[in-house]
């Protein structure tokens, strides 16, 4: 299992697929790295030499933003949007979709589990509420 910039890449896969395990590297960048490092495209990751690993590592560190730097950059961008109170920042803060999707229905991934708000429709529940024995309240939503 070769280790490139702090990430163990699977040794039993072809190098162009194994490089995708690094955050920020997709198919196009992986193919470009393999081509520029002069590695035969079908080579398994555990068959590449230490020189090839060093070449790929230097290319990644000098020319691409990957792993921790990329995650930090994205988090910083979102914090900036929230700080200036723009529409996207407010949507991020409220955990709602930022790109114009509808939220009346759907958007469950961002909003979480459905929590019903409003009148009690079941007659037996209404009677329990009136008698003074309140039913357990619904759990509060995520803030």
Image (cartoon, rainbow, N blue to C red):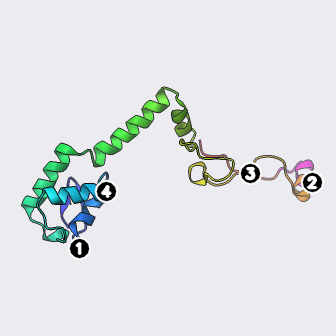
Foreground label between 1 and 3? 1
Foreground label between 2 and 4? 4
**Which numbered disc covers residue 127?**
2
In the picture of the structure, the residue carrying the numbered disc 3 is 116
**Alpha carbons under labels 2 and 4: distance apart:** 59 Å
Sequence-first tag of 3 and 4:
4
**Alpha carbons under labels 1 and 3: distance apart:** 49 Å
Residue 18 in magenta stretch: no
Residue 116: % across, % down? 74, 51
- Report the span colored magenta: 128-134
Report the quarter where the N terminus lies. bottom left
Sequence-first tag of 2 and 4:
4
In the picture of the structure, the residue carrying the numbered disc 4 is 26
Which secondary structure lies at badge 4? loop
Which secondary structure lies at badge 1? loop
Q: Residues within 10 Å of mark 3 (few under 14, many from 20)?
A: few
Q: Say left or right for 16 vs 55.
A: right
Foreground label between 2 and 3? 3
Q: Residue at x 16, y 52 (%)?
A: 57
Q: Residues within 10 Å of mark 4 (few under 14, many from 20)?
A: some
Which secondary structure lies at badge 2? helix
Q: Residue at x 67, y 46 (%)?
A: 140
In the picture of the structure, the residue carrying the numbered disc 1 is 12
Sequence-first tag of 2 and 1:
1
Foreground label between 1 and 4? 4
Q: Residues within 10 Å of mark 2 (few under 14, many from 20)?
A: few
């Amino acid at each position: 299992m070769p280790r490139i910039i702090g990430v163990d890449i699977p040794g039993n896969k072809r190098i162009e697929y194994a490089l995708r395990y690094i955050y920020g590297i997709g198919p196009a960048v992986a193919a470009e790295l393999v081509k520029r490092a002069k590695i035969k495209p079908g080579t398994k990751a555990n068959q590449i030499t230490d020189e090839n690993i060093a070449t790929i590592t230097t290319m990644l560190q000098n020319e691409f933003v990957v792993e921790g730097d990329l995650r930090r950059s994205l988090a910083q961008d979102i914090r900036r949007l929230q700080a200036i109170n723009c529409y996207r920042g407010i949507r991020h803060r409220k955990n709602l979709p930022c790109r114009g999707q509808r939220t009346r229905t759907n958007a469950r991934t961002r909003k979480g589990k459905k929590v019903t708000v409003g009148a009690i429709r079941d007659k037996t529940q209404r009677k329990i509420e009136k008698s003074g024995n309140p039913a357990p309240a619904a759990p509060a939503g995520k803030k």
